[in-house]
Image: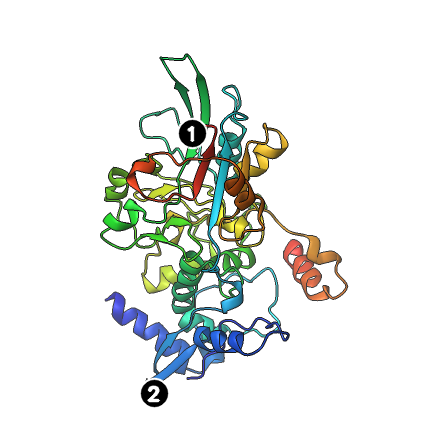
């Protein structure tokens, strides 16, 4: 059943008209990321994130490559979701970013048995850089919600 | 399906030739078998990875390491997020202070003992899944993604350097993931070393401790640790085993 559901979602996300799919009631309510990427590619990430994480984890753990693009740590840092008390929620919460889709497709993720599901500390240094309008905008939008 | 480059870091334009050749071996290889079926293999970029020409090591001067000081242990615990939970038999010990007494002379010594990062590590030999491994730069680690928690490595290690995590762990450090059911040990603070830093224990020893520890590249004859090793007598714990540890002791 899990396989079928996964295949269904992948098919829906990959080949369906994404605008229609995202309007559907079936589409999970995905929390917004804290920052914006220069080149967002959500469709690719939705389909391939597990492959990127798996290959990159080996590059980091086994070979000591600290400069990889798709690290679990950077996912966590950007996709952190604030709870009602304004602190970041953990994987225990249904509002957690990964859980939005993973509950719908019925897949358990075990990354967070070892990894911390929350970013260590909020880094506001980006706010004060010259070209940080996107970061500032995202932050202001977030606190206004 | 066209996949993006996973590593798109800028490369150093100065050094061509051999480096370009090395890089081509480390770049991503994508093979499309059939539409929608893609095999990917990428090893990151060669420049940022652990350098096989390096061998990281520690030198601990036992004369300077005093009995009442445990700054290295405190710093390690704080850095990597392990702590006493009140169960001394099962608590993690990445680094510990050992007190020695020579009954014949009455000489008392104290030293810090952690994973000795052996060249021929017994923990790597016995691991059934390949989770216990040695990095190209000589640091011995546990890949917790493949560790099944069998604890053979704990049995094999003559230094008792590895610990098993018995209880669920929360609020880990992002750079030091730890989880129930896996084995762990000193990582020589790889997350610091990989970005040019020194391990937390060495930093603490040199700031608030007694300056007994030196960290450096054993293979670089210009490094302080190599000069010290070449100038003064040093020893390895259980050197009779011939494991060639990366952690060395002076005045032991």
* Up/down of A86 relative to B78, above or below: below
Colour scheme in the image?
rainbow
| Residue at point 58%, 38% (across, down) | B203
Residue A23 visible within the image: no
Q: Which residue is mark 2?
A: B35
Residue B129 visible within the image: yes
Q: For the residues carrying marks 1 and 2, which lies nearer the camera in this image?
A: 1
| Residue at point 26%, 50% (across, down) | B125
Where residue B146 appears, x then y in whole percent? 30, 54
Q: Which residue is mark 1?
A: B96
* Up/down of B225 relative to B95, above or below: below
Q: Residues within 10 Å of mark 1 (few under 14, many from 20)?
A: some
Which residue is nearer to you in this view: B177 or A87? B177
Quadrant in the picture for the C terminus of chain A: bottom right
Q: Quadrant of residue B160?
A: top left
Where residue A1 appears, x then y in whole percent? 23, 67
Q: CA distance from mark 1 to mark 2?
A: 55 Å
Residue B111 placement, left or right of A125? left
The chain carrying label 2 is: B
Q: Residues within 10 Å of mark 2 (few under 14, many from 20)?
A: few
Circles 1 and 2: CB distance less than 8 Å?
A: no
Which residue is nearer to you in this view: A127 or A71? A71
| Residue at point 56%, 62% (across, down) | A33
Where residue B81 appears, x then y in whole percent? 47, 38
Residue A121 placement, left or right of B239? right
Element type at marker 1? strand
Which residue is nearer to you in this view: B238 or A39? B238
Q: Work out which residue is located at the far right of the displayed protein and give it.
A: A130
């Amino acid at each position: 059943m899990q396989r079928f559901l996964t295949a269904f979602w992948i098919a829906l996300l990959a080949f369906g008209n994404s605008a229609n799919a995202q309007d559907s009631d079936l589409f999970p309510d995905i929390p917004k990321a804290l920052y914006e990427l220069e080149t967002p590619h959500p469709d690719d990430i939705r389909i391939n994130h597990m492959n990127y994480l798996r290959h990159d984890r080996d590059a980091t753990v086994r070979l000591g490559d600290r400069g990889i693009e798709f690290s679990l740590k950077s996912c966590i840092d950007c996709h952190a979701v604030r709870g009602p008390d304004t602190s970041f929620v953990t994987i225990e919460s249904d509002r957690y970013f990964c859980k939005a889709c993973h509950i719908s497709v019925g897949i358990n993720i075990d990354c967070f048995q070892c990894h911390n599901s929350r970013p260590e500390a909020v880094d506001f240094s980006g706010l004060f850089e010259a070209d940080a309008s996107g970061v500032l905008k995202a932050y202001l939008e977030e606190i206004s919600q | 399906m066209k996949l993006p480059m996973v590593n798109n870091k800028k490369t150093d334009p100065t050094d061509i030739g051999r480096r370009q050749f090395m890089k081509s071996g480390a770049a991503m290889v994508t093979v499309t078998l059939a539409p929608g079926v893609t095999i990917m293999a990428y090893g990151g970029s060669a420049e940022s990875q652990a350098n096989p020409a390096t061998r990281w090591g520690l030198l601990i001067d036992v004369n300077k390491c005093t009995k009442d000081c445990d700054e290295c242990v405190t710093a390690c615990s704080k850095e990597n997020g392990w702590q006493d939970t009140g169960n001394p038999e099962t608590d993690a010990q990445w680094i510990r202070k050992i007190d020695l007494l020579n009954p014949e002379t009455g000489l008392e010594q104290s030293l810090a003992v952690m994973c000795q990062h052996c060249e021929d590590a017994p923990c790597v030999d016995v691991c059934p899944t390949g989770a216990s491994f040695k990095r190209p730069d000589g640091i011995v680690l546990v890949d917790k993604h493949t560790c099944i928690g069998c604890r053979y490595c704990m049995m094999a290690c003559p230094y008792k350097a590895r610990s098993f995590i018995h209880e669920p762990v929360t609020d880990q450090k992002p750079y030091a993931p730890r989880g129930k059911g896996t084995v762990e040990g000193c990582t020589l603070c790889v997350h610091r070393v990989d970005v040019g830093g020194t391990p937390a224990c060495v930093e603490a020893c040199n700031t608030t401790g007694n300056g007994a520890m030196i960290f450096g590249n054993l293979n670089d004859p210009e490094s302080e640790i190599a000069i010290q090793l070449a100038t003064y007598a040093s020893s390895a714990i259980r050197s009779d085993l011939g494991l060639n540890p990366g952690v060395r002791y002076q005045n032991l």
